[in-house]
Image (spheres, grey):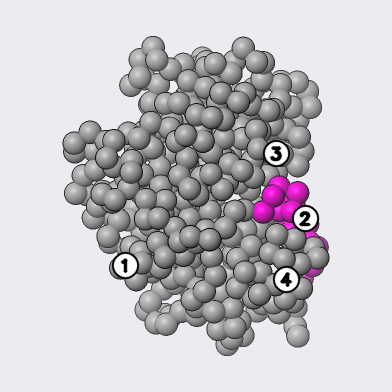
Amino acid sequence: MSATPRRAVLAGILPGAWLGRGRAQTLHSAEANLRVMAVAESVQQSAAVLHDLPLEAGAALPGLSIRVADLSSITSELQREVADGLTDTEIVLTNFAGYALGAMRDLWQPLPDSMIQVALAAATPVGLQVQAVLGNSGLVIMAAPGGPLLIHHPTRLVTPPRTPAALLDYARQNPQRFQYPRPGQSRFGQLFVNALPHLLGDPDPLDPLAGWPRSWEYLAELGRHVGYYPSSGGAALEEFAEGGSDLMPCVLNSYIGGVTMGSLPADTRGVLMEAGPLLPNSIILAVPRPVPQERLSAIAAYMNFMLAPTIQMRVFGRGLVPSHAAREALPPGAVTPADLQRWTQVMTPELAETMTSRHTVAPLAPRALAAMVRRWDESIGARFGEAP
């Protein structure tokens, strides 16, 4: 498997990709043509920008009503809407975790091949990996290597652990100073757990039930030294920012966005494990089943607009570094010195080199991901902090 091209690494860096504890809110209460549920944290932080895009495009796009929600909304209010045949939500913008939750409940409708071909033509190599897992029930809007990184406070932890063994030793010696959010409710937790089979040499990283004996043993031991598991990535970042933990897994865009936009302490630093592949972080567009076919033309127009290089840059931060292909399609001045400064402030040369030299593996299929979450909830999440 080849190393990740630099342009693929940069394809999802959002300057403000951090949001605190999720709460539903309506950003545009006027009557709108397309009703969007924003579930991924990096989409939520960009919701105001997304709301303004149709206004800038004039008649080229329908208006939007954007509802910000957390992952649990997919299995609660959205699932009820689909069961009742309602079309209160016409587009869901979410990460792979949210997509998988909906896919396992048969919430998404198959999309026409014409829309899939447009998404494939615009996808980065990492995006193609994710799209292959989605099939025809979701479209990759953005995809990039996400990590997981381990972020830390250098003043309290000068040399962070970079192997699973070193991390376990750190957790034993510093109880409750390392934490990770629940993988069923956070992409941070998912990427951390999904990386372990690769790092520990489990027989089948794609089969959580039969192929992860070392990972489940490791997670059980690690859980004895974890105080609790936050319910979302935003909650874990808030805890970290307030000094409640010194070390936690994160994804690249949330790390960069949190530091540069002030949600995380300015001295926060991120490192990768010494070995192992990267896992993707992505934004996926899915359409709930009750949405009528005649609405797909408006949804396709919105998707096409979202995939344009200038919009990708504004919403997801693509093109911050000149070697990214999207940069070449941007008008002069679209990437400002401030954009580049935000990038270089926290993206150390070592981290940049490591990110671009590692290969990226495809995410777990939705059914395997659901099996992993169930196993984690039953055997790990319910037993944290138990004495050896």
Provide the residue designation for mark 3: 102
Left or right: 295 as drawn, with respect to 107: left
Cα separation between marks 2 and 1? 36 Å
Q: Marks 3 and 4: CB-CB under 8 Å? A: no
Q: Marks 2 and 1: CB-CB under 8 Å? A: no
Q: Which mark is residue 203?
A: 4
Left or right: 382 as drawn, with respect to 284: right
At label 2, counting other C-alpha atoms closer than 10 Å, the crowd grade (few under 14, some 14-19, many 20 or more) is some
Cα separation between marks 1 and 3? 37 Å
Q: Is residue 137 visible?
A: yes
Which dot, 1 or 4, sits closer to the camera?
4
Identify the residue shown where x is 77% and y is 38%.
Answer: 105
Provide the residue designation for mark 1: 348
At label 1, counting other C-alpha atoms closer than 10 Å, the crowd grade (few under 14, some 14-19, many 20 or more) is some
Residue type pointed to by label 1: Thr
At label 3, counting other C-alpha atoms closer than 10 Å, the crowd grade (few under 14, some 14-19, many 20 or more) is many
Q: Marks 4 and 2: CB-CB under 8 Å? A: no
* Residue 382 belongs to magenta span: yes
Q: Secondary structure at mark 2?
A: helix
Please name whichever residue, 146 or 3, is drawn nearer the observer in this view of the structure: 3
Q: Which region shows up in magenta?
A: 364-384
